[in-house]
Image (cartoon, rainbow, N blue to C red):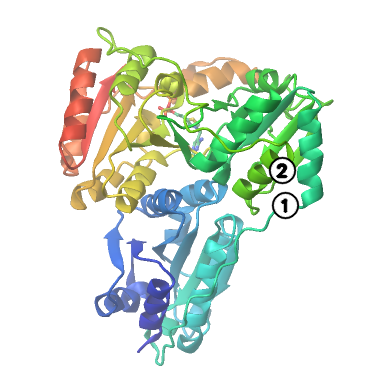
Amino acid sequence: MNGAESLLRTLVDGGIELCIANPGTSEMHFVAALDRVPGMRAVLGLQENVVTGAADGYGRMLDRPAATLLHLGPGLANGLANLHNAKRAFTPIVNVIGDHATTHRHLDAPLTSDVEAVAAPFSHWVRTATSSRSVGRDAADAIAAARSHPGQIASLILPADASWNEPGLPVKAIAIADAPMPPDESILEIARRLASGEPATILMSGMALRQEALDLAAAIAGSTGAKLLTNTFYGRLERGGDRAEIGRLPYFTEQAVEAVAEAINLVLVHTPAPVGFFAYPDKPSVISNPNTRIHVLAEPGEDAVGALRALAEALDIRGTQKGASASQAPRPDRPTGELNPLTLAAAIGSTLRENTIVVDESTTAGAFLLNATVSAPCHDWLCVTGGAIGMGMPVATGAALACPDRRVLNVESDGSAMYTIQALWTQARESLDVTTVILSNRSYAILNLELVRTGAAPSKEAEQLFNLAQPDLDFVSLAKGMGVPGVRVEDAESLVRSLEASYDDPGPLLIEVVL
Ligand SMILES: Cc1ncc(C[n+]2csc(CCOP(=O)(O)OP(=O)(O)O)c2C)c(N)n1
């Protein structure tokens, strides 16, 4: 057995069943070994930011890592933006990054670079394998790092000779410890603060946005009068149906400041204290009121459900009633007429089906989506966690690979779509049930807003740089060229019909919504 095979066997033994890959010459022995190792599915992504984004979507849905296969420093560099989003989502991923053979590195051949240095800012764990004998151990350590709490990015650099040399020695999976509980004293202190009746907000993200944690938090909020909010962007929120409703901290600084202004106590669960997404000359960077006391109920690596249960017990709240905190708002009616952000949201809200996974990279045109879907049947909501656009189509692809029995609805603004549009090809090749709704406003619309908000002067150049018309992008043709059927809709009735048709028919479909 060579090093590559031992690496693959170790990955499979560690529960990694999917390798999303964009390989090159230095990864040939890894690719060849795939045939000899049952249990590993390999899926091709046509650019590395598709690969890393798909691994993010997969990990967010299953809470366990996929592997990526990337080609030296440049291949990794292409995938960094979505690795950044994955890191911000606490998604577990094991990157396998091929590199030149150890005997070749000193020659500075064209593809040579400092791969560790490229990986480091976007990884929690980085190691370069040194021999075929130790690569199995390295892989087991990488899996353990990725699966530790909260999920982590582990990057294992694989010199070609560590791959092709023999012997390779597979290593058994390392047991992962449960997430630790936060200290009792801090839970009791938070219970005292919440019981005092002082205005409080509980701000949540990470694993606190899963149903059990949400139900506990809603019971705590209901009994103490605290307000419940998610941070603005999160990896995955379980919502709809009988799940507890939770508001969202707004994106714009002044609205976010307003949302938490009254809190005397701000309780954080799996999220840092909120800060402005950007700095502006005349706006604060810190969102919370300077008089607010900030309490950490559970750090991202700690047990959020356990902490919320302990807090509920300390407050003498016994049990949660299923559905008690679910939204009572009516679902929107099927819209008719002109397509705009409101009718778009109503079309999605009125048709969304049970168990759909929504990947939201809708930017400005999606402003009403969360409200319009709050009373839809149970579904999951995935956001751009790190602000690096171009995540939606890859993450949707990975979520569909993770959950083949669920429909993925990717609501995707047109500018963001163009970063990683080749994800559609993987969706077609793997027959994935992904409905992509392109919000075609032919603009980087948010940048027009931000130009004004930063106080920069509007200019002709800016107008030109934020405008995606001339030529108009033809998304239906782009999709067709990658094997995905597409339809362009120009009124709300057609959008509703196309959404329902896509939910009924297996495989991917792209719907271009002309706004
Ligand atoms: C990787 C990356 N590059 C550039 C940006 C800057 N940026 C933020 S939003 C945006 C345009 C978004 O346009 P679109 O997706 O069409 O949404 P719209 O604003 O029109 O709703 C750009 C270029 C970014 N956030 N991330």
Q: Residue at x 49, y 40 (%)?
A: 211
Q: CA distance from mark 2 to mark 1?
A: 7 Å
Residue 108 at x, y percent in the picture: 50, 74
Element class at badge 2:
strand
**Amino acid at circle 1:** Pro
Furthest residue toward right? 291
Pointers 2 and 1 in contact (C-beta within 8 Å): yes
**Amino acid at circle 2:** Leu
Q: Is residue 400 above or below residue 117?
A: above
Q: Is residue 368 above or below residue 23?
A: above
Q: Residue at x 76, y 37 (%)?
A: 191
Residue 226 is left or right of residue 512, and the answer is: right
Residue 85 at x, y percent in the picture: 51, 46
Q: Identify the mark at residue 182; answer none if there is no mark.
A: 1
Element class at badge 1:
loop
Residue 422 at x, y percent in the picture: 29, 45
Residue 190, by quadrant, is top right
Q: Which image quarter is the C terminus in?
A: top left
Residue 201, by quadrant, is top right
- Inspect this view and state whether residue 275 appears: yes
Depth order, front residue of 482/318: 318
Residue 297, by quadrant, is top right
Residue 120 at x, y percent in the picture: 60, 61
Q: Residue at x 34, y 16 (%)?
A: 346
Dot 1 beta carbon under 8 Å from ligand 1: no
Furthest residue toward bottom? 167
Residue 233 is left or right of residue 44, and the answer is: right
Depth order, front residue of 406/151: 406
| Residue highlighted by disc 2 | 297
